[in-house]
Amino acid sequence: MKNPDESINWSEVRARSARESQRKQVKMLKEGNQMADAPLPLHKSVYIDEERFQAEREHIFLSQPLVACLSGDIANTGDTILFEAAGPSILVTRGKDGTARAFLNMCTHRGAKLVEEAEPWSGVKNRFTCPFHAWTFDGTGRLIGQPGKEGFEKCAIGGRNLIELPCTEHIGLVFVKANPDADEIDAEAFLGDYADVLAQLELWRAEPVKKGVLTADSNWKFALDTYGESYHFSTLHKSTIANTNYTDKQVFERFGPHHRIEFPKLSTGDLIDKDESEWPETIYGGVHFLFPNTGIFFGAVAENVFFTQVFRLFPDGVGKTRCQFAVYAPFGVESDAHRDSCIAAYDATATVVQDEDYRVASNGYANLMSASKDYHVVLGANEMALHTVHQNIAKTIGMPLEQE
Ligand code: FES
Ligand SMILES: [Fe+2]
């Protein structure tokens, strides 16, 4: 996979960033939490309105660059994944030339699916043969086999290649736009300064370990809201996250529509009265949010045992969320024990998210559906990451947050 700069020692970069982040956390713990200027009331229609949802489908899920997978999910020639959550069924595949490409999973003869499995399917395919009449396409989408070819002569669309979608690979992320008519993806412009933050994760080295789907009976944004604040740690996650991390304390940094949040460990509080020279080494971590729907957590399961978790939230209709959740070994799987710890990290996190975060999201969503016409939820000034996500989504779909 492509390392953007071979001359950089990324572990040193992470160590520097971790120290800088530690300073910001200590300062915040001393001086008080970051706050938005005011709380943000949101009318329930932001989550339940069908028209708004259709605008999100069109302007976000069918128009924005979305993370289809990491480079390591299609590490070798022919490696292919199915990406269906944004709407159309899409194949993302690595060709012989090493390039990642995305195609509609749709035969150009009569529309059959070339790969009939369901997401999160992955496999090795150097060619795609349609199960209907056996038209065959290579990894670059070219039609290379067409039984009864003479039946399609003298017709402009009698022998088309696969329909390609905008796709680009950048710092270990494979971006796709789920619309063949959309403009090409300019990943550098899309990420801006955030690329330097994400590069530290060395995502191009990440090796997939375990993947699955988490579901919530709620609008995708209502589920997404559970990732952006630590206000709920000591109540909802009292026996898990609250044992290690502060509640309602975070360092929040914006990078255009993207952001990074660090939720300080309780042990960081010990540093407040110590000189920096006495601070212990710390590791880089944090929640990295990539607009519009992706969260990347980087951290250690145990001393020097790292893992990367990727959450991608998609709507499955206005009131359902499907989260594609995957855990990676950040620098490759080092041993069976390392693989086992990454699997354990997947299982533990999936349980917390599914049984705790998505439980309250689903229950709350049922309440929204039956709440009075003018019901608003309110995002506190202490929940500022949520404000920016909602504001950016509203801006992208061209619909203000307050409609009533
Ligand atoms: S639909 Fe694919 S070959 Fe006919
Ligand atoms: Fe949570």
Image (cartoon, rainbow, N blue to C red):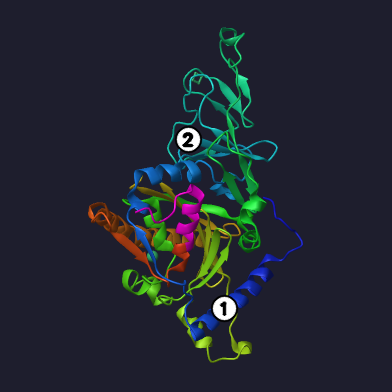
Element under label 2?
loop
- Tell me which amino acid carries mark 1: Lys
- Contact? badges 2 and 1 (CB < 8 Å): no
Name, please, the residue furthest toward the right: 7
Which contiguous range is marked in magenta? 388-404
Q: Looking at the image, which is closer to me, 35 or 237? A: 35
* Residue 390: in magenta span: yes
What residue lies at 77% left-to-right and 62% top-to-bottom? 7
Q: Nearer the viewer, residue 36 or 299?
A: 36
Residue 318 locus on image (x, y percent) = 35, 45
**Residue marked by disc 2:** 89
Depth check: give the residue in front, 218 or 19. Answer: 218
**Relative to residue 371, is residue 206 drawn left or right?**
right
* Above or below for 76 versus 338: above
Residue under the image location 39 percent in, 45 percent down: 53
Q: Which image quarter holds the C terminus?
A: bottom left
Task: Residue under label 1, please give it.
Answer: 24
Mark-to-mark CA distance, 2 and 1: 43 Å
